[in-house]
Image: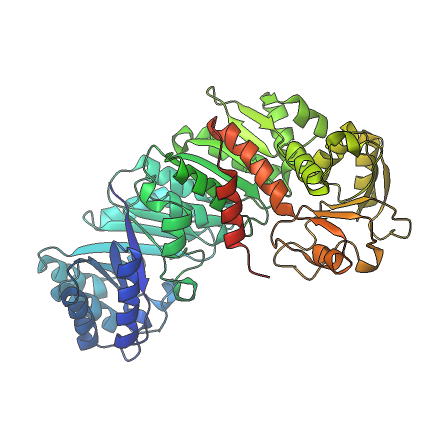
Amino acid sequence: METKLAVPIAARNIDQAGEQIKSARTAGADILELRTDYLENLNLDLVKKLIADVKNTSDKKLPIIVTCRDKRQGGAIDYPQKLRVDILAAALKAGAEFIDFEYENFISIEGQEKIRLALSQSSRGRLILSTHNFETKFDNIGKLYRKILNVCPIAIPKLIYVANHINDCFEAFDLLHQTSAERIIFCMGAGGLISRILAKKLGCFLTFASIDELNATAPGQLTIKNLKGLYRFDCIDTQTQLYGVIADPVGHSLSPAIHNACFDDKQMNNLYLPLLVEGGRQDFDSFLHHALMRKWLNFRGFSVTIPHKQNALAYVRVSRGYVEPLAQKIGAANTLLVGPDGKLEAYNTDYAGALDAITTGMKISRAKLNGLPVAVFGAGGVSRAIVAGLTDAGAQIKIYNRTIEKAQNLAAEFNCEFAPLDDLKSLEAKLLINCTSIGMHPNVEATPVPKEFLKRGMTIFDTVYNPAETLLLKDAKKKRIKTIDGISMFVNQAMAQFKLFTDTDGNPDLMRKVVCDLLPAE
């Protein structure tokens, strides 16, 4: 079943609707959903005219879904049920291919008889019976699915719920996997974003995308530009192999853009997703367990970043997977591969990515790092990789961190000095590295090191890459201090990940171009 891409038309009047319909056609919509509950002064003639305009103004005949949503189920204007039912009946008569009505309202006698009559008098009209939960998962989504079909076997069931965590998506995936008829099942909210993309892989009848961010009609709805461009929607099929970046937050990550661009460049049937895994190790473990036990999802690899790099290593150890010696030494993994036997493999590409960025930026060989005084800010996964690399090279390292115990523990592992984040009076480093998320988008006005502590003769390296020029780097440049941005490290480690994922080389120039094009201009 080929999944259709439906674009909602959520306009206040006919003229506005016309503009939105034109934009949706141009962007590549497969179906138009006329959300008539957004129209002001709604009446039957208004809807008939809107449908006629769609049918008569283009060579490309796009199917139409007419929806007049109940306010309780996400409708915009609180129109009475009688008017809403009359609108749907009139839409069928005017030639709409689909009408969408709420299951809860359909099972009441009042609306059901009129809709059934209108359907019987339509040569091709279909009914979508929908139910939404804007708070959490359904108690039993499979049972609800069967109830909808029992009430109207020829209807297309539509079951949409908010995923308060990415792990809530798996019930929707399971129902899609277990069924094969026409059905619409996905999740709303940030946690449910991947379900909107994977709808096509799992044979969902349709998924939704908005014309732009301002015209989204549900939480977590992607724009048609991002769905088709960033997430390669037109290339997705049942055989698509999945990859993704596990992070919290994940919205800022440019990893999906660079990996998908390289997959596209190599014409690979792969898709890279943003995987928002909130919470700690238990939530992380649960996500990986859910993703890997469903082999039909075909997850083949993961990038891992803040705050889960140590969780990733721990998971692979416990599951008796392979841990490369470098990741073992660092105590953190930023790359997971799913082996042919289903076992996980853990790697760390931050190490080489960071050292290459440092030596290139400072125009020195690795040998010149021996004895170099270095201040490392942060004690998380990136810090561990960089401290391990610099320790191997013989650098003299002092670790600064807000939680002093973490700095102390990391320093003990690698025989370094440590200090609290605000103890900067004795800062005498030649190389200062920010490995925290301080200064990362959207908190761009923050810096881990106040400008008065930045001195001539230092080199300042910020591993944050969004924005490309953080406040820390701006402050350093004002003092004419040499800087290294996070893009270099990001591209270096991403290249190493791409090689692990695909056993082929990515395109570093393409990666850098994608990153620079997407980052906001200074």
Q: Is residue 81 visible?
A: no
Rendered position, 123 above or below 87:
above
Where the C terminus falls, by quadrant? Answer: bottom right
Of the pair 208 and 15, the residue shown nearer to us = 15
Image coords of residue 153 (percent x, y): 20, 47
Q: Is residue 24 left or right of residue 124?
A: right
Q: Residue at x 36, y 36 (%)?
A: 267
Quadrant hosting residue 57: bottom left
Identity of the residue furthest to the bottom in this view:
41
Q: Residue at x 41, y 60 (%)?
A: 218
Marker count (numbered): 0
Image coords of residue 187 (percent x, y): 41, 50
Q: Is residue 342 visible?
A: yes
Rendered position, 518 above or below 255:
below
Rendered position, 459 above or below 210:
above
Of the pair 314 and 256, the residue shown nearer to us = 256
Image coords of residue 239 (percent x, y): 34, 32
Q: Is residue 423 left or right of residue 496?
A: right
Q: Residue at x 27, y 76 (%)?
A: 15
Of the pair 92 and 374, the residue shown nearer to us = 374
Image coords of residue 398 (percent x, y): 84, 40
Quadrant hosting residue 235: top left
Q: Is residue 16 left or right of residue 369?
A: left
Rendered position, 137 above or below 12:
above
Where the N terminus falls, by quadrant? Answer: top left
